[in-house]
Image (cartoon, grey):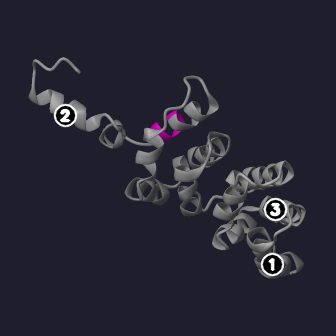
Amino acid sequence: RLGDHIVSKGIPPLVNAVVTEPEDHIKSAACWSLGQIGRHSPDHAKALADANVFPKLLAVLLHDSSSEDLKTKSKRALKSVIQKCVHLPALEPLLHDSPENILKYVVHQFAKVLPHDVAARKSFVTSGGLQKVLELQPEPGSKLGDFVNNIKETYPPEIVDYYSPSYSKQLLDMLDPNATGE
């Protein structure tokens, strides 16, 4: 099929352009093209994930010397591909490195997929993903906060408590009935 051929043959040179091309306008075109491929379907998004595209798009987005157009194209590509990516292990590194305007799309994907996938829920806990999400401090009432709460609701309260940043302090406070909470 033509689409499969485009994915298998088209992604590597586009990724190479994003990484090695000195001209930002060419990098911008490569980012845009990768976004168009990845937003097509979950399989296409996984092909980009398998090619390690997410950290490369994030790197050009965050690089100080990237042009505004390149930053815009890489951000749009990331957002559109993340929204199609159901291969959650590919998204986990983005939990650690992304600015909030990208992070909310990453966390939203987890919030959409985890309720329907037991294996993914287990993997998310064992990989440290749940703990990382629980360490986020989103603004109350924000979309990111809503997505974090959606993820919490997919787990039993004991697991959420265990991986919450304040859990060890709560346990230690139980040892001292006179603890003031300070």
* The one of 65 and 89 positioned closer to us in this rendering: 65
Q: Amino acid at mark 2?
A: Leu
Circle 2: is it few (<14), some (14-19), or many (20+) Cα within 10 Å? few
**Residue 23, image x, y percentages:** 86, 66
Residue at the image position 53 percent from the left and 57 percent from the top = 92
Circle 3 residue: 31
* Apparent side of residue 132 relative to residue 53 in the rendered image (left or right): left
| First in residue order: circle 3 vs circle 2 | 3
Circle 1 residue: 13
Residue at the image position 64 percent from the left and 72 percent from the top = 50
Relative height, residue 177 to residue 143 (above, below) = above
* The one of 181 and 131 positioned closer to us in this rendering: 181
Q: Which residues are magenta?
A: 149-153
**Residue 38, image x, y percentages:** 77, 63
**Residue 66, image x, y percentages:** 78, 55
| First in residue order: circle 2 vs circle 1 | 1
Q: Main secondary structure of the magenta part?
A: helix
Nearer the camera: disc 3 or disc 2: 3
Marks 2/1: CA–CA distance: 53 Å
Circle 2 residue: 171
Of all residues shown, which one is farthest toward the front? 65
Q: Amino acid at mark 1?
A: Pro
Marks 1/3: CA–CA distance: 11 Å
Marks 3/2: CA–CA distance: 48 Å
Q: Secondary structure at mark 1?
A: helix
